[in-house]
Amino acid sequence: MTDPSPLPGADHARHAEPTIEDVAAAAGVSIRTVSRVLNKSPKVNAQTRERIEAAIAALHFRPSLRARALAMRRSFLIGLIHNDRNALVLDSIQRGIVSVTAEQGYELIVHSTPLAGDAAIADVIGFAGRSRVDGLIVLPPISGVAGLAGALDGAQVPAVAVSSVPLDGFAGVILSDERGAGAQVARHLLDLGHRRLGLVNGPTTMASARERRAGFIGEAAGTADASVAETAGDYGFASGMAAAQALLAGPDRPTAIFAANDIMAAGVLKVAARMGLGVPDQLSVVGFDGSMLAQMLTPALTSVLRPFDAIAAAATRHLIARIEGTALPAPFHPTLAIVPAETTGPAPKS
Amino acid sequence: MTDPSPLPGADHARHAEPTIEDVAAAAGVSIRTVSRVLNKSPKVNAQTRERIEAAIAALHFRPSLRARALAMRRSFLIGLIHNDRNALVLDSIQRGIVSVTAEQGYELIVHSTPLAGDAAIADVIGFAGRSRVDGLIVLPPISGVAGLAGALDGAQVPAVAVSSVPLDGFAGVILSDERGAGAQVARHLLDLGHRRLGLVNGPTTMASARERRAGFIGEAAGTADASVAETAGDYGFASGMAAAQALLAGPDRPTAIFAANDIMAAGVLKVAARMGLGVPDQLSVVGFDGSMLAQMLTPALTSVLRPFDAIAAAATRHLIARIEGTALPAPFHPTLAIVPAETTGPAPKS
DNA sequence: AGGCTGGATGATACCGGTGTCAACAATGCA
DNA sequence: TGCATTGTTGACACCGGTATCATCCAGCCT
């Protein structure tokens, strides 16, 4: 059949994986027909199909992702971009992504960039071009970098952001009620009798942080004698401590503090301890994310649980649908629920 | 040159990335010569090389990883396998890996398996076969699964374990002095005057945990009136709490507890707080890993710092050297140093 | 019976690179 | 000047799949 040329360079092949040709020979058909079976084409005789499937099983044949990718001009690779140094939830997110990619025939390729700003954009575009991913999943905080979505769009790379709210340029895939969650927290604290509230904001560049703030402040405004003292935070531990120090310095310090993520809340707890403030007796604290950190802190942190694995899975499904041009799934509305733990209690009498 | 056949199926190409052929045309050479430049072959005239490199730069050409992979029968993909649900350090590890893969022309592909035991082995082998990775990096705890190394070996997949000590079947790539670190912890506590020591072990199936224990107990044995009470742990938070409850129940409770990782140490702190034991006044606690959790706890946890990013980078370098058949780098000996924080202090008088 | 129709299958080009080997020019040496 | 040698370069097959198109074979119609 083929040219009887001596095979060149000897066979230093490590894998010796069977190829589609081996399957075709075993089943007595052409490779094209095997290919049809692999792609579930309906135009194959039932008996032929069975014969081929038997051969595939017997040989433990797995089609080479890269040969297929080359021919189809698609890589079946989904890229994940992250640059968070405090990625408490990275594991859940990857688990959620892989659960979907595995069932849809994709693989997850990860790029963790140490850069920020425009350099990060260049790095991401370079990664996408190099690895030829079919699509990209972008995590905060890099997903909030201005211009990233536009750059990806320009490079024709489908991308979704694992973000709770629509991000500039990114499609709104996950629509969680951050505002409502912020309101829930305020309501929880108000119901416990707190009136002087403290807020440690997330980065104001992030829409989700702004939403949480709006919900929290809006709910508090509904109670006449309630007030909110705000401080800036950047989701980092140090910023949580700094914010707490600022909030707790004066005489009319808040009796409850809401931090926009668990990490900053941990910083608040540390400052409270140093100041000798009992939690929750003298100060209540609420975090956000429901990460494992919340449970591991002492006292256990009251926090708003976000189902990261489900969120990541939904983002992945959306991305794959976009890549394949199939019907887009409806936006995913995760439930954000406050999980009361040990850091919230009735407001002190004083 | 080529057949003037009408291009089929129209061009629904999304990327429109330039190919090696475009570069060759722009530089007025054959694709083979461009390929030589890409592979840094010395057999190219300096002027020709410059011309080609200029064309590459002008066209923003990036060679397609998958075409190259197909031709070279290598994927340039390195797989990372993890199954830890409490991956506090996953981020550092991925950052360390990517810092090396990026500079060596590889990409990182991640598989997170929800399975355990033999099913996990099958899952990993399936992943390796499907994605055709050139090599695999395996994280604990799945790296400790009996038979995994053998299975990978049988499948001809080069693999390294990011493990501190030689693991059954895996090459000893990282050789950290876990025993010495365990001894350091004991010494620290003995120097502070503690004599009744508690130990929350890691899984006894893990060599690194056994080493830490041996070092800790060995060092304590050198002090006549010192004693060590041991309990079992599985690196999980709940097991840390359970162990602490067991250790602290009796009348002659230890005045210092060493937990084999930070997560279990957090559990110990929580139990101590519930029992009203002041830390470090009545009880000292030491963790292991030096994760960000240690700093975020209150009081800040004394822990043994492990440079996970450097460890992961070293493992990656070793793996790539194995893949490419170049000289293996010397085993990496990371320094494990105890970082005193707020959870250790002088033994109580009593 | 002959032509038409549609389903099943195969031959062959192609995806974008690399490996092999031959062709060719320039150089060194006798 | 003739010839071997070295340095550059290109033609072509190939990696393992998929896409296009042609072919073959029944079954059906007039």
Image: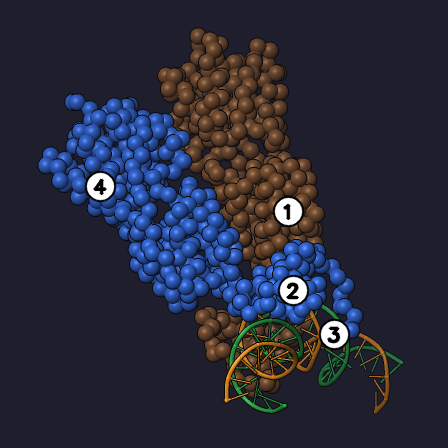
Chain colours: A blue, B brown, C green, D orange
Residue A345 percent location from the top left of the image: 25, 27
Quarter of the view holding residue A13: bottom right
Report the front residue among A188 and B90.
Answer: A188
The answer for how far apart the CA atoms under marks 3 and 4 are is 73 Å
Per the image, the residue denoted by label 4 is A183
- Residue A20, labelled with which disc? 2
Is tag 2's residue or tag 4's residue first in the polypeptide sequence? 2
Residue at (73, 74) in percent of width and height: A2
Task: Reply above or below: B158 against C9.
Answer: above
Residue at (53, 67) in percent of width and height: A42
Residue at (49, 56) in percent of width and height: A104
The answer for how far apart the CA atoms under marks 3 and 2 are is 16 Å
* Pointer 3 and pointer 2 on the same chain: yes
Quarter of the view holding residue A57: bottom right
Is tag 3's residue or tag 2's residue first in the polypeptide sequence? 3
- The chain identifier of the residue carrying mark 1 reads B
Which quadrant, please, contains the N terminus of chain B?
bottom right
Q: Secondary structure at mark 4?
A: helix
Amino acid type at mark 1: Ala
Residue A87 percent location from the top left of the image: 42, 43
The answer for how far apart the CA atoms under marks 2 and 4 are is 58 Å
The residue mark sitting in front, 2 or 1, is: 2
Amino acid type at mark 2: Ile
Per the image, the residue denoted by label 3 is A1
The residue mark sitting in front, 2 or 4, is: 2
- Left or right: residue A41 compared with residue A5: left
The answer for how far apart the CA atoms under marks 4 and 1 are is 50 Å
- The chain identifier of the residue carrying mark 4 reads A
Per the image, the residue denoted by label 1 is B159
